[in-house]
Amino acid sequence: MKEQLPDRDLFGARPHEYVLPPNYRGTTCASCGAYIAFVRTPAGKAMPVALATAEIRDGVTYCLPHWIDCPQSREWSSKK
């Protein structure tokens, strides 16, 4: 069962979204084959983001983490 996408705040931002850098390299998820990219979190860790959730606001591209829409996200979680 997929998790429901988060609601937006007053400025149109979605919780947990990340800025997609202009020089990103797309790849595919090893589990589900979805088109993804990796970004760095504020803690410096690599986070897969789903390019299908890409949204451009004010010239900046934002994406949601891939664990929101990956059917096998629980298998990849480090918090088992």
Image: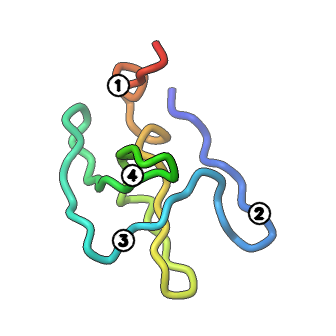
Secondary structure at badge 1 equals: helix
Distance between the alpha carbons at the discs numbered 4 and 2: 20 Å
Return the mark for residue 76. Answer: 1
Instruction: Say which amino acid is labelled 4.
Output: Val
Return the mark for residue 49. Answer: 4
Q: Nearer the viewer, mark 3 or mark 4?
A: 3
* Residue in the foreground of this view, choosing between 66 and 2: 66
Image point 35% across, 46% down: which residue?
Answer: 46
Q: Mark 3 Cα within 10 Å, few/some/many (few <14, many 20+)? A: some
As drawn, 72 above or below 60: above
Image point 45% across, 59% down: which residue?
Answer: 53
* Residue in the foreground of this view, choosing between 1 and 53: 53
Instruction: Say which amino acid is labelled 3.
Output: Pro
Instruction: Say which amino acid is labelled 2.
Output: Asp
Q: Earlier in the sequence, mark 2 or mark 3?
A: 2
Q: How many marks?
A: 4
Q: Earlier in the sequence, mark 4 or mark 2?
A: 2
